[in-house]
Amino acid sequence: MPVKMPHLYNGYTVKVLGLLAIIGFAASVWFILSGRDNPTPTYKLLCQIIGALWVLGPPLWFFYEHFYYFPKHGNSDADFAQLKSSQDIAAKVWAAFLVVLAALFTGTFPK
C-alpha cells in the first residue's frame, strides 16, 4: 500500500502557481505562433524576452522556494526531500516547455 505524503503547502498555492504556469505557457505558444508567418523586429524582440523569462524564471523560483518560501510557508509535516522531488518533476516539465518554445521560435517545430 502506498504511503500518503503530506502536501507541501496548505491551501491553493501549488494549484494557483501551476495554473499560472500553464496559462503562461499557452499564451507564449499563442504569441509565437501568431507572428511566425510575418515576423517583425518587435515580434522577434518580444519572443526573445519571452524566452529569457522562461529560461530564468523557473530556476529563480526554485531557488527562492527552496531557501525562503518553503521554510517559511511550507507545511510542517512535509520535508525537504519531498520538496526536492517536486522540484525535480517541475524542472522536467519546465525543460519540456523550453524545448517546445525554442522549436516554435526557431521554426524547427512542424507547422
Image: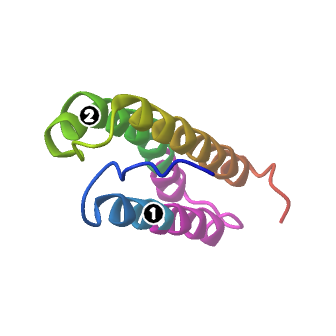
Residue at horizontal 32%, vertical 41%? Answer: 78
Residue at horizontal 36%, vertical 59%? Answer: 17
Q: Amino acid at mark 2?
A: Tyr
**Left/right of residue 48 with respect to residue 32 in the rendered view:** left
> Which label number is shown at residue 104?
none
Check contact, mark 2 vs mark 1: CB within 8 A: no
Which of 108 and 43 lies nearest the eye of the viewer? 108
Residue at horizontal 56%, vertical 42%? Answer: 89
Residue that badge 2 annotates:
64
**Percent position (x, y) of residue 96?**
66, 46
Question: Residue 58 occupies which quadrant of the picture?
Answer: top left
In the image as oriented, which residue stretches furthest toward the right? 110
- Magenta span main SS: helix
Q: Quadrant of the C terminus?
A: bottom right
Which element carries disc 2, helix, strand or loop?
helix
Which of 39 and 54 lies nearest the eye of the viewer? 54
Residue that badge 1 annotates:
24
**Left/right of residue 9 with respect to residue 39 in the rendered view:** left
Magenta range is 23-48
